[in-house]
Amino acid sequence: MGLQGRVAFTPSLFGELSGGVLPHVHIDVYSGRALTGSARLEYRILHNLALGVAYNYFRISGTVSDPQFGGDLAMTIDGAEGYLRLAFGR
């Protein structure tokens, strides 16, 4: 499940906010969940050239309940990014 929203503040300045969740899922001996999110701000320098900044978040956690091989997994990745976007077409 997820949500995403985009807005044009001006003809050259755009914002985007998105988030998603994978609720608790259980498949055989594996179970887990995930959460993602991002926020972006992009400025169009020219019609096909933009400069942007973003913050991204990703978290996953899970377990394995196999009697011969069990364990837990937890990982979080988050941070800022800067990018240059080149668009093709009209």
Image: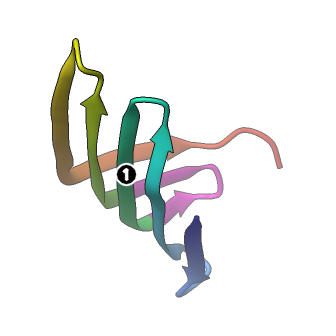
At x 28% / y 41%, what residue is drawn? 62
Q: Is residue 83 found left or right of 15 in the rendered image?
A: left
Image quarter where the N terminus lies is bottom right
Q: Position of residue 72 (x, y in %)?
A: 16, 35
| Horizontal relation, residue 57 to residue 22: left or right | left
Q: Compared with residue 62, is residue 29 higher up or lower down, i.e. above or below?
A: above
Q: Secondary structure at mark 1?
A: strand
The boundaries of the magenta stretch are 43-52
| Residue pictured at 32% horizontal, 59% vertical | 54
In the rendered image, residue 24, in percent from the top left (x then y), is placed at 42, 56
Q: Residue at x 18, y 41 (%)?
A: 75
Q: Residues within 10 Å of mark 1 (few under 14, many from 20)?
A: some
Q: Looking at the image, which is closer to me, 65 or 12?
A: 65
Look at the picture and state if 7 lies above or below 19. Answer: below
Q: Disc 1 marks which amino acid? A: Arg
Q: Residue furthest bottom?
A: 9
Q: Position of residue 7 (x, y in %)?
A: 58, 82
Residue 48 located within the stretch drawn in magenta: yes
Find residue 89 and report its horizontal and vertical position in percent.
Answer: 80, 42
Q: Is residue 15 above or below residue 52?
A: below
| Residue occupied by mark 1 | 33
> For the view shown, which residue lies furthest in the front direction?
67
For this rendering, which residue is in front, 41 or 29? 29
Residue 3 is inside the magenta segment: no
The residue lying at 49 percent from left, 54 percent from top is 50
Q: Magenta region, mostly helix, strand or loop?
A: strand
Q: Nearer the viewer, residue 68 or 37?
A: 68
